[in-house]
Amino acid sequence: MTSAGRPRPTAHETGDAGVNGVGTERRSLLVRGGRRLVGEVILAGAKNSALKLMAASLLADEPSTIRRVPRIADVFTMIEMLRALGAEVTFDDGELRIDPSGQLNDCAPYELVRRMRASIIVMGPMVARLGRATIAMPGGCNIGPRRIDFHIRGLQKLGAAIEIEHGFIKVTCDGLRGAVVPLDYPSVGATENLLMAATAARGTTVIENAAREPEIVDLAKFLMSMGAHIEGAGSSSIAIEGGHALHGAIHEVIADRIEAGTYLLAGVVTGGDVSVSGLNPPCLELFLNKLRAMGVQVDEGDRTIRARALGPLQPVDVSTLPHPGFATDLQAQFMVALSLAEGTSIVTENVFENRFAVVDELNRLGAGITTSGHHAVVSGPRQLTGSVVEAPDLRGGAALAIAGLVAEGATEVRGLHHIDRGYEVFDVRLAALGADVERIEGRYAAGSAGR
């Protein structure tokens, strides 16, 4: 097998060169279909964990080192955020050193928070460390409302005072106090913010109906290595005994399960043979079971997963749910495979209301998808044909690239900056598996990609 490991990317490849947004929207990915993908991908660290670990480093007044950090645009945005808050940050070859020992600023800049929703995660650590925080209302992918009120009500339970005015959330407290905090919904972001804030609260905090994602467990492990006392991470009830002094720590980010699923699907749609390494397979248990139900041969090893499409794909129904349910971040990519299946599948989106934004673009390539509310009906099998499409968001962009791999002719996926937010050297890794992909600076005229 060939290997799509971890080539050291340049700033140009990751989006670091365009971190302020200048020119990044003009980048496209040109995908020429018809090649079978074969090989192994050594997974990068999880985007959805690394960003939260970076925020957690603010809790100590000593440096921390985080390893296996992906070189993606969102990480560079978070680096800017930490520096704006007063921390010293160095990043070299996947190793991030964060020193927050100096005087910290209590205001997260609007231009950074609006660019990336995950920036809201600095609120908990700032309140814990400084007793105050001012955060702009978040931006990021347009995939529907993410309930900030879960964060706010949770912090109020811990004794914080909240004011929202002129698009900013202002949080103040005269010492946090432990409490039982029931969440109406197992929000990942709210669980993480409360988990970090509770490390500074007097007494014990219990987060009920907590998110159970592997990234929550990774954050808890980092916090415990810093000196926090936490029990139950990965379950629906997390207990935090607050008030213990935290210190710097060294931690390695878990592998990115969404990256794993994306590359496995890229292999499946091309009739290929792709393996991913570095991930604990149970993190993707339901996803892998759905692949098997489609007729895909899936082999699990010690931190490895191999997927081979040995025959026609079969239709399956999918409903996204919080972990351990089917991940919403894999829904768009999975719909591409379902469009090739021999029959009709129903996809139900239960997490984000705008996750079907990519459907119109997939249909431009020939997919037979109709939507009604939070349901999508995917009719297959369809012969996809290359065209010019626009990535509506991070995972939608990955789905369009996957569709391009199996489409006849060439597909130009515009809005590559969305993909660069969450995938480390996406084009390089696909090329290492045998794909014919090319990063374009500037845009072709409409229709040129299909010629």
Image (cartoon, grey):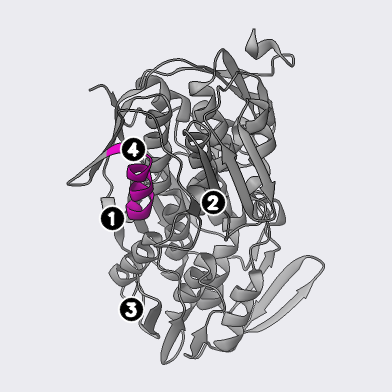
Q: Amino acid at mark 3?
A: Ile
Residue that lies at the very extreme toward the front in this rendered image = 343
Residue situated in front as seen by the camera: 221 or 227: 221
Q: Quadrant of the N terminus?
A: top left
Residue identified by numbered label 1:
282
Give the image location of residue 207, x and y in percent: 45, 81
| Front: mark 3 or 4 | 4
Quote the CA–CA distance across marks 1 and 4.
19 Å
Sequence-earlier tag: 3 or 4: 3
Queried whether the magenta region covers residue 294, the answer comes back as yes
Q: Amino acid at mark 2?
A: Met
Give the image location of residue 321, x and y in percent: 49, 61
**Magenta span of residues:** 284-297
Residue identified by numbered label 4:
295
Give the image location of residue 404, x and y in percent: 54, 23
Q: Residue at x 65, y 51 (%)?
A: 143
Q: Residue at x 70, y 62 (%)?
A: 136
Quote the CA–CA distance across marks 3 and 1.
23 Å
Relative to 40, is 407 on the left or the right? right
Image quarter of residue 106: bottom right
Quote the CA–CA distance across marks 2 and 4.
40 Å
| Front: mark 2 or 4 | 4
Q: Amino acid at mark 4?
A: Gly
Q: Residue at x 51, y 85 (%)?
A: 181
Residue situated in front as seen by the camera: 373 or 210: 373
Main secondary structure along the magenta-highlighted residues:
helix
Question: For numbered disc 3, what is the local secondary structure?
Answer: strand
Q: What numbered label is drawn on residue 230?
A: 3
Question: For numbered disc 4, what is the local secondary structure?
Answer: loop
Question: For numbered disc 1, what is the local secondary structure?
Answer: helix
Residue identified by numbered label 2:
78
